[in-house]
């Protein structure tokens, strides 16, 4: 299967904010944040349908999310995962002596992972902490 | 019949809207509807009424199940954990009121803890830059009444501060800005075509991570010096055009967000943005303001600064405050494995810290004070649910422009639930006894 390389950034979306206040253990939070927004041209390179589950891998970790067409594009070459545990499994924790991890600008690889499940927010962090991922 | 509580302050983002109206039942016990709030603010008020809400502290058992305990037992556990730890971390503080923060700092001082707030993953680098070169800023009231040139750099208020533009920065008709949005120029700098960028007079789609270069190019353009044809993905002509828009206004402001604070360059990006603001004051009046996220992260910085002298990442392990981001900051302390107890209040590092730092919270003894079930509560040994500040209890909070506003209590919390401040007072009294402090 094809793999593409993207530059990952994360940030707030209004649906992330609403879902967060509605409960991070709920399905709505997974639907709001367990996604990667990609450009149309990147979908063509990856060769998959929109709303397919994908595995995103960075030098710091790996996670399954749903690939969605970006609502705030075009941004070819840039992937966007709303702030939350899914993005934070991938980001660069190095603060370079500033105290601030490098949340934006992590190189990631994306590949199709149709049969793999997207975990709920709390479950994802618990499993990652227990080393079960 | 129902009644309406007016002038309610929204405890979600740093905009701290103070014009909400909340409809409650006649006995004042239940929230029915929320008016004037954004979608996120309304959800915060309505979710506080959820029937499946946790109302008592619970201790995680070795098999992952939870055992309900009393607030007294929870306070005992927390006090023993903090008093017995060598280097406890007390993190969060941004979604609670200043009174609770102050009480927490008393505990931190007695326990020689590291105290940090969510600026660590938000505007911490801004605070470093402000200490480097200062901050020419103003209040949001001045923006509303005077600003005719608005720059949103690396921030997306349409999503993150949904009412910022309608209350202060773009749409309101102020004293000198009588035509509302028609009297304002909006420039957005963002690597994505965000919903904010779609509204702009000019969008500069900067190459991600090259904000420093573009800010520097602006300083060159203001002086009419030589520029390369393209800087950070933006053609020279467009940079000069944007620079001229900035110089031509009567009062301008740069609002900036995570796009600059979290990208490589970090505090140096902000240094440069502040230098741009300083340069622009040679031509017109210009200000700059960070778009603070949590509703009281600014308050936490204020309280820490007046009590310990530093706005975040304060290390009290030697019995006096030290501050050295990169060394005393929570992400670094956690990833280096230096912490032996974690106390989290009013924030969710489980969801918003890199996973390597979260793993350390899961490894050590940990207490999470939060009304919600969160990834942090999910990996903590003790979860203490409390009343929502701004919904079920009042207290002071600071808006993003450092204006203090008193939050209002709208309804009572579920019977028997404590507020952050009440619980922290119980912990403080116990720590005093354990430490033998008079």
Image: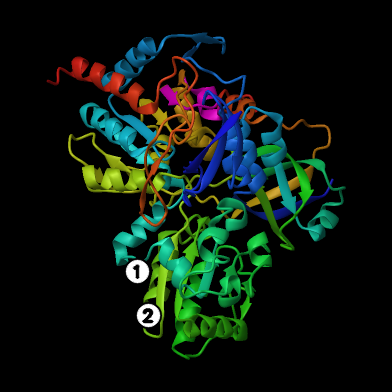
Chain of the residue under the numbered disc 2 shown in the image: B
Is A86 displayed left or right of B284 in the figure? right
Way the structure is coloured: rainbow
Is A68 displayed left or right of B303 in the figure? right
Earlier along the polypeptide chain: callout 2 or callout 1? 1
Q: Are marks 2 and 1 in contact (CB under 8 Å)?
A: yes
| Residue B47 spot, x, y in % from top left | 60, 30
Q: Quadrant of the N terminus of chain B?
A: top right
| Point 36% across, 53% down: residue | B403
Chain of the residue under the numbered disc 1 shown in the image: B
| Point 18% across, 39% down: residue | B320
The residue carrying mark 1 is B136
| Point 62% across, 56% down: residue | B158
Residue B19 sits inside the magenta stretch: no
Say whether mark 1 and mark 2 are on the same chain.
yes
Q: Quadrant of the C terminus of chain B?
A: top left
Range of residues picked out in magenta = B366-380
Is B430 displayed left or right of A65 in the figure? left
Q: Nearer the viewer, residue B189 or B200?
A: B200
The residue carrying mark 2 is B281
| Residue B346 spot, x, y in % from top left | 44, 34
Relative height, residue B342 to residue B171 (above, below)? above
Quarter location, residue A133: top right
| Residue B142 spot, x, y in % from top left | 41, 67
Q: Nearer the viewer, residue B371 or B44?
A: B44
């Amino acid at each position: 299967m094809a793999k593409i390389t993207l530059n990952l950034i994360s940030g707030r979306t209004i649906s992330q904010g609403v879902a967060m206040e509605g409960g991070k253990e709920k399905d709505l939070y997974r639907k709001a944040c367990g996604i990667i927004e990609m450009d149309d041209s990147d979908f063509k390179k990856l060769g998959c349908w929109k709303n397919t589950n994908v595995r995103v891998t960075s030098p710091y970790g790996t996670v399954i999310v749903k690939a969605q067409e970006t609502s705030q594009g075009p941004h070819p070459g840039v992937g966007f995962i709303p702030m939350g545990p899914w993005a934070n499994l991938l980001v660069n924790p190095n603060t370079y002596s500033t105290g601030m991890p490098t949340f934006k600008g992590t190189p990631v690889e994306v590949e199709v992972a149709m049969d793999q499940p997207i975990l709920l927010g709390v479950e994802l962090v618990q499993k990652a902490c227990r080393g079960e991922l | 019949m129902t009644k309406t509580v007016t002038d309610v302050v929204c405890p979600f983002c740093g905009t701290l809207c103070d014009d909400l109206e909340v409809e409650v039942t006649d006995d004042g016990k239940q929230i029915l509807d929320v008016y004037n709030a954004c979608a996120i603010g309304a959800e915060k008020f309505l979710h506080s009424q959820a029937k499946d809400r946790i109302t008592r502290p619970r201790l995680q058992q070795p098999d992952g199940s939870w055992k309900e305990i009393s607030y007294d037992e929870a306070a005992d556990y927390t006090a023993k954990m903090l008093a017995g730890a060598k280097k406890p971390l007390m993190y969060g503080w941004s979604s609670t009121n200043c009174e609770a923060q102050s009480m927490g700092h008393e505990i931190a001082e007695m326990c020689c803890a590291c105290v940090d707030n969510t600026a660590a993953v938000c505007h911490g680098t801004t605070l470093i830059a402000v200490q480097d070169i200062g901050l020419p800023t103003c209040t949001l009231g001045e923006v509303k009444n005077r600003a005719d040139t608005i720059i949103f750099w690396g921030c997306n208020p349409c999503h993150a501060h949904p009412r910022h533009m309608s209350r202060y920065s773009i749409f309101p008709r102020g004293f000198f800005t009588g035509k509302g949005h028609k009297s304002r120029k909006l420039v957005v700098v963002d690597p994505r075509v965000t919903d904010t960028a779609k509204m702009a007079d000019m969008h500069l789609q900067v190459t991600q991570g090259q904000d420093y270069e573009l800010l520097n190019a602006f300083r060159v353009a203001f002086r009419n010096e030589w520029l390369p044809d393209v800087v950070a993905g933006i053609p020279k002509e467009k940079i000069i055009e944007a620079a001229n828009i900035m110089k031509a206004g009567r009062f301008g402001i740069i609002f900036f967000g995570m796009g600059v604070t979290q990208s490589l360059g970090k505090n140096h990006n902000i240094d440069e943005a502040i230098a741009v603001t300083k340069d622009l004051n040679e031509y017109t009046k210009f200000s700059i303001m960070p778009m603070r996220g949590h509703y009281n992260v600014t308050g936490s910085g204020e309280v820490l600064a007046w009590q310990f002298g530093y706005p975040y990442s304060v290390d009290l392990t030697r019995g006096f405050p030290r501050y050295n981001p990169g060394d005393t900051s929570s992400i670094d302390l956690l990833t280096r494995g230096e912490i032996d107890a974690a106390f989290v209040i009013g924030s969710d590092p489980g969801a918003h810290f890199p996973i390597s730092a979260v793993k350390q919270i899961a490894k050590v003894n940990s207490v999470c004070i939060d009304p919600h079930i969160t990834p942090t509560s999910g990996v903590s040994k003790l979860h203490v649910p409390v009343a929502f500040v701004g919904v079920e209890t009042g207290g002071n909070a600071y808006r993003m422009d450092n204006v203090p506003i008193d939050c209002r209590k709208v309804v009572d919390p579920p019977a028997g639930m404590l507020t952050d401040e009440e619980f922290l007072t119980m912990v403080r009294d116990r720590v005093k006894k354990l430490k033998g402090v008079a």
